[in-house]
Amino acid sequence: MYKKRKYLYALFAFMIAALICIPQALQMRTQAAAKPGTVKLNSISAPAYNKINVKWKKTSGATHYIVYYKKEGTKKWTKIKTLDNSKSSYTHTSSKKYPIVVGQKYTYTVKAYNKKTKKSGSYNKKGLTAYTKPAMVKNIKAAYKDGIVTLTWDKAAGADKYLVYRKDNGKWKMLALKNSLSYEDAAYKKGEVNTYMVRGYYSGKKTKGSYDKDGVSVKVPADAAKPTEKPEPTEKPVIPTPTATPSPKPTKVPDPTETPKPTEKPATPTPTATPKPVTPKPTKAPEPTEKPVTPTPTATPTEKPATPTPTATPIPTATPTPSPEPEMSVDEMASEVIRLTNIERVKAGLSPLQHHAGLQRAAMVRAEEITRKFSHTRPDGTDSSTALYENGVSCSCGENIAAGQKTPEAVVRAWMNSSGHKATMMQQSITHIGVGVCKSPITGQWLWVQDFSYNPDAKGSVIFDANGGVFSSNNSNQLIISGPVDAMLKVSKVEIPIKDGYTFAGWEDGITEVGIQEHPMRILATWTPISES
């Protein structure tokens, strides 16, 4: 009986122990189950220049989801948002605390979290990567007037500059990188529909925005206005000042001296220089301020020999006055055009332009070229701006040409009387000028050129990235080509990189030409795997 009772006690104790342990085991199992699973990331996208959206698949055991991000080049994850388990996506909008920089790559991951157990699930350590880019440029308009195609557009979010393109033989050719919301093109194709496109650009990360592949178009008439109307604006022959013998030489000498630095000069001559046609001044009096009143009484009137005879007798003694109008040299004429141009700019409240040696060389080249082909297209078929870049000058801001005017006064007046050419001369942004003058060996007429720039000495570059390949010339994955800003570089002349197992397929976006910029653009090589057979 005693043994039986002892057995029953032992059995009872075992059952009690079992009853105590079972709930504990169940609790442990429950707790283990409460640890959330691993979140599977579905997709990532950048719907705007300052937003990145990440999506994931819900997992078991999660009461919340925690979103993390990190920028390229860093290892540490930053927690940016905790969401309840009803959510399976999150749009990160740039903020001061959690910024998004256009063009900067960001990687995102998501952890599941159980608030009751305070446990987190595993997470995708690689994450998904995306970056934002400038918004598409909207409301692009193109209009032709007075020999110029003018483009305007709205500001694009996330862009600090704008790439301007014109379609050439079915491919987009980059024309300029602009800080403003407009662009003037004088190198269009006459008698054709010219198509343009503008693309937002963020210089901080050299990131280009998306664009409308159709662009905007404008028809340029076949008889598009040439930069030389009004060959002879009214009076200039009033210079028959034969009696200006007393000082034919000094008359011309002072002007050329002051021109190379037009900045300081415009102030004095401004008031007199324009109304000058009526004055019986010999060609160009040394001091424009001195109104012709002083010289007039003594020698001007040829018709009144009566009174002046006594005084005038001594002067005619030096009768070397056969050629009353001593001819200006080419350099003197160029300098005078600059001086007169600055007078007009100052009258309009604009800063005078500085003479630039490189621009001057380019303008002289162009003056000779238009004796053979009167056009903004050079005899070799390239745009007139290439003459500037060949002479080391950056940032071409336009060109004026004219033919037939005999004097600097006449040509400046002709340009001022043409709205298109006046607009080119009166651009607020330009800072420097070069003038070319040339006499046609065939017709004997004078031809004139003005070339403008806002930063002629600026230098830039383009970075060609082998994208996993290498350039043989420098044994590097990058090739940097430098030159004047805005100069167009034909990529066909760029060294082709090599990459084991791949064939070079060309440069990204099918680029054939690229503009050299102060903030260099990076152009990636594209590759095609060599198929193994």
Image (tube, rainbow, N blue to C red):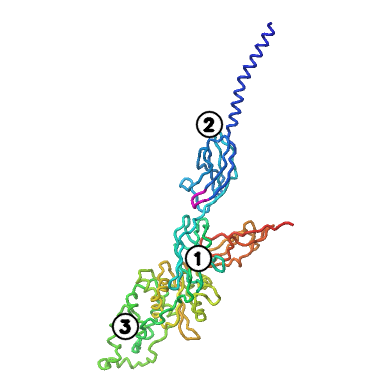
Q: Amino acid at mark 1?
A: Tyr
Q: Count of labels shown?
A: 3
Residue that mark 3 sits on: 279
For label 2, count other residues whose C-alpha is less than 10 Å away and answer few (under 14), some (14-19) or many (20+). few
- Please, is residue 43 above or below residue 197 in the view? above
Mark 3–mark 1 Cα distance, whole angstroms, equals 49 Å
Reading the chain from its start, which is encountered first: label 3 or label 1? Answer: 1
Query: Is-magenta flag for residue 189?
Result: no
For label 1, count other residues whose C-alpha is less than 10 Å away and answer few (under 14), some (14-19) or many (20+). many
Answer whether labels 3 and 1 touch (C-beta < 8 Å).
no
For label 3, count other residues whose C-alpha is less than 10 Å away and answer few (under 14), some (14-19) or many (20+). some
Is residue 500 visible from the viewing direction of this image?
A: no
- Quadrant of the snapshot with the C terminus: bottom right
**What is the x, y in percent for residue 398?**
46, 71
Mark 1 against mark 2, which lies toward the viewer?
A: 1
Residue that mark 2 sits on: 116
Q: Secondary structure at mark 3?
A: loop
Q: Secondary structure at mark 2?
A: loop
